[in-house]
Image: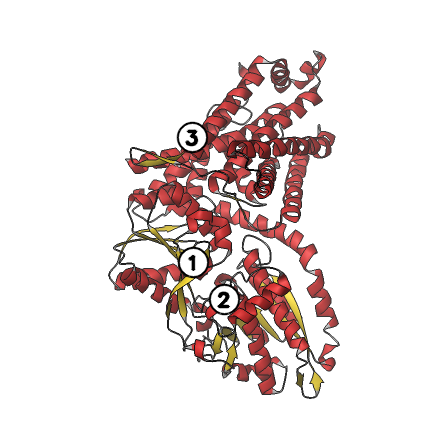
Amino acid sequence: MDTFLQQLINGITLGSIYALVALGYTMVYGIVGLINFAHGELVMVGALTSLSVIQALMAAGLGLPPAAVMVAGLLVSIPLCMLLAYAMERVAYRPLRGAPRLAPLITAIGVSIVLQNVAMLFWGRSYFSFPAVFSTTTYSIAGAAVTDLQILIVLLAGALMAGLLVVVHRTRLGLAMRATAENAQVAGLMGVDANRVIVAAFLLGAVLAAVAGLMVSAYYGIAHYYMGFMLGLKAFTAAVLGGIGNLAGAMLGGLLLGLIESLGAGYIGDLTGDVLGSNYQDVFAFLVLVVVLTIRPSGLLGERVSERS
Amino acid sequence: MNFSRTGIATTLALIALGVGGCAEDKKPQAAAKSETPVAQTATVTIGIVAPLTGPQSHIGKDLENAVRLAAEDANAAKISIGGKELKFQVMAEDDQADPKMAPVVAQKLADARVNAVVGHFNSGTTIPASKIYSDAGIPQISPSATNPKYTEQGFKTAFRVVANDNQQGKVVGEYIARDLKSKALAIIDDRTAYGQGVADVVEKSAVAAGTKVVAREFTTDRSTDFKAILTKIKSRKPDVIFFGGIDTQAGPMLKQMKGLGITAQYVGADGIQSTELFKLGGEAVEGTLASFPGLPLERMPQGRGFGGKYKAKWNQDVVLYAPQGYDAFNVFIEAMKKAGSTESAKFLPELARIDYNGITGPIRFDAKGDIKDGPITIFRATGGKWAAVATIGGAAPAAEKK
């Protein structure tokens, strides 16, 4: 039982990070119908930037409290990621709007490779260890270990998602976003500036990606220049699992994927009598994706709810 | 093997190829070209292959640094063979720790007609590359590949200057069973030729010495998330966890173990016995045990001198296999001197019967090409450093000085 609980806790933590990243994919897809494959690289840039800032602050020996150091990291990484997302949209996607769907997909992959290589030149190829800014306290719940970092990750992710929902459903910008998602041309006739809305979606996604970057590097204690690729792929999977273009779907898909991976890795060996080991955890996750898509091709919650509601 | 991993590996390889291609390749190619008229002017080109990009690049660069240092020293020594002064040059190539890349890179060195090769670093890359070198008749000394299969293929060109995993794994397995008195051992490996190889031998010898294996888990050499497998292992309540793999995984794994409240003794082999592990794992590394197929740098006959020289040249400490890389290079020179020739075919027989006192100790090869009497040392991570706790085997090299 304690093992089950532990895997559950691991899964929820991992899942909330996936969900944050998945939201970035889904927002952009919902509005422009573009899969921004470079989104995972924003997470990587966010992680490495905040890591560098934190390292510099630690080295300066100012004796700042851990929370202040982390926030300082985010204060640098969030604007940088937003800037990158904006540049990405202007350079690689906007000129191709209206082009066949394949074209922006290719430029997205191109942007992803460029960002990875720039990061490799800038930060080098080695793994960065997350500096010991804070010492985590481990709590024991019914035999399972929970660190304060895990609790913080889940709470912060939850708060950000709630904040995003408020923006999308309660503000003028959100209204414009939903209108553009539904029908960009009609929204344009109603005075909505599609370009601004699209940029806003990219920027919101970049904020979430920067925060997720700091989370994932703090959680696993490591960051490197290609960390964004796999994370991006998983988050994209989560978005598809929940129904791409659908905000609630991305959150659900993220959490679900985290849980599937964690529980899959924990129990796949027991279920198959140790024939398949925990190294099959990715296979398991993608198998679930295949099954879900076979039964519900548009994902668990369906694509773009706004169109139907 | 799952499809996602293959996909990533391929993509990464392509990316690394793209970037490594423009950044790294220019120098060696220039070297290879200038080598053509070189046969007359007695230039000797030695290849060094290791992962110079990617997660293991710190270890690969360490080897490249050692070989460049050896070449510099050899040029300064003005060695002459057959009345011609030898000019040593280094051709450094990146195999990205990828078994698929290794033969490609090896072929490149063979085409450039290098005189000898130091490398590769990983067992997984050394084994496929060794066939190419054998076919081309190029002598190869791996400074670090420990998988037994490397020298068991019957290639006359394959040598190594470290003890193999059969020797290392056996010592570690027995150490776990007898000295740590483990009753419940959990084993994790990264499914590479090296990681799985050493883990299998540890499992066998620990079980033979009376330990029970309670969990056997796998990860990959690119993973960073070990929470799920560690949680599973925790449920089996092991007293010792052995990891067959590299520091890049061991660092975060140790941190995550601490987060999960796992208190079992962590043991690894030479792949984690690096200074980098302390950076990657922080405080969580304290108390970790790791074996190394050789002596600690300070106990090597000329270890201290080498450590100082290396630091003066590269402004960093020896990461892992630099002394072995340096020795491998010098073993080639010794064989060339004995044979009175820099031609691969002529000095190869001398290599097989070499008796050389290197930085790491005396180097002699058995019939297969494995080092004779390679010592194995167990280290404990203490206060951010590796402290030797036991040395097993070896030919009492501390006394031998030349």
Can you identify the residue that label 2 sits on? Answer: B144
Q: Amino acid at mark 2?
A: Ser
* Dot 1 alpha-carbon crowd within 10 angstroms: few under 14, some 14 to 19, many 20 or more: many
Q: Chain of mark 3?
A: A
Secondary-structure class at tag 1: helix
Using the rendered view, name the quadrant where residue B211 is placed. Answer: bottom left
Q: Nearer the viewer, residue B136 or A18?
A: A18
Instruction: Give the secondary structure at mark 3.
Output: helix
User: How far from the left and from the top, in percent, is residue A180?
Assistant: 64, 18
Please, what is the three-letter code of the amino acid marked with disc 1?
Gly
Marking on residue B195: 1
Mark 3 to mark 2: distance in Å? 42 Å
Which-is-in-front pick, marks 3 and 2?
Answer: 3
Which residue appears at 55% of the width and 78% of the height?
B331
Question: Is disc 2 on the same chain as disc 1?
Answer: yes
What's the CA distance linking mark 1 and mark 2?
13 Å
Q: Position of residue A24 (x, y in %)?
A: 57, 29
Q: Amino acid at mark 3?
A: Ile
- Disc number lying in front (1 or 2): 2
Q: Is residue B271 left or right of residue B344?
A: left
- Whether residue A249 is visible to the viewer of this picture, yes or no, is yes
B198 with respect to A30 (left or right): left
